[in-house]
Image: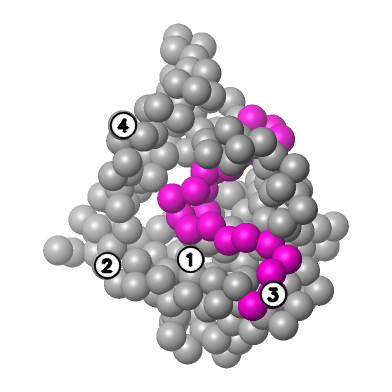
Amino acid sequence: MTETLLATELTPLVLQMSPAIEMTDEQFFAFCQQNRDYRIDRTATGEITIMSPTGSETGNRNWKLIQQLANWTDKDGTGIGFDSSAGFTLPNGAIKSSDAAWVKLDKWNRLTPEQQQKFAPICPDFVVELRSPSDKLQPLKDKLQEYLDNGVSLGWLIDRKTRQVYIYRANTAVECLDNPPTLSGESLLPGLVLDLSSIW
């Protein structure tokens, strides 16, 4: 399979739904459950974006990323982690999922059990996006910025293609690191040091 074909297959399909069809949060949740083989987001303006499953190599790298984050989360105990199948309803109304996310435990516990079971109305404190070889960079940058605008304190965009990492922090300019061996969780995730050798 050529890179061009692969890139075409992984370009998000954007459905213009609103105002002709407006799904409630409950209907959108049901729609996603009926189409679990796809990664489905909804923008703040009601557009629905659909992505096919990621390639196997990228899935493996994401597994290694989540493994390290999960190990730290279990040891730290101050928050809980999520994989790419978890969706969150952001304050601007968008429903997004990221490759990995982390939420402070006290913030998570303020939600009702029903809210926790669906697309939780909460913005994660930390998110990670892992760029696959066929992903376009700008949409991922836009996604991280949207997270930041809605309350994320720290976000990582890991670009395996160029071996660069874009670090998003609240009230700070985006920082770009060239081929870093590790990433620090800083004050938000104290003690977390992500080893990138198994992710590049």
Residue 36 percent across, percent down from the top left: 32, 41
Q: Amino acid at mark 1?
A: Leu
Q: Does dot 1 land on a helix, a strand or a loop?
A: strand
Query: Which residue lies at the image location 67% right of the left edge and 52% below the top edge?
Result: 124
**Sequence-wise, which precedes: disc 2 or disc 1?**
2
Which label sits on residue 180? none
Magenta-drawn segment: 75-98
- Residue, disc 2: 56
**Sequence-wise, which precedes: disc 4 or disc 2?**
4
Q: Amino acid at mark 2?
A: Ser
Of badges 3 and 4, the one in the foreground is: 3
Of badges 1 and 3, the one in the foreground is: 3
Query: Within 10 angstroms of label 1, few (less than 14), some, or many (20 or more) residues?
Result: many
Q: Does dot 4 land on a helix, a strand or a loop?
A: helix
Which label sits on residue 34? 4
**Sequence-wise, which precedes: disc 4 or disc 1?**
4
Query: Which residue lies at the image location 41% right of the left edge and 39% below the top edge?
Result: 40
- Residue, disc 3: 76
- Residue, disc 1: 130
Residue 58 percent across, percent down from the top left: 35, 68
Please report contact status of discs 4 and 2: CB closer than 8 Å, yes or no.
no
Report how far apart the C-alphas of labels 2 and 1 lie in the structure: 13 Å
Q: Amino acid at mark 4?
A: Gln
Report how far apart the C-alphas of labels 4 and 1 lie in the structure: 26 Å
Q: Amino acid at mark 3?
A: Asp
**Sequence-wise, which precedes: disc 2 or disc 3?**
2
Please report contact status of discs 2 and 3: CB closer than 8 Å, yes or no.
no
Q: In this picture, is 173 found above or below 117? A: below
The answer to whether residue 57 shows anywhere in this view is yes
Residue 187 percent across, percent down from the top left: 81, 74
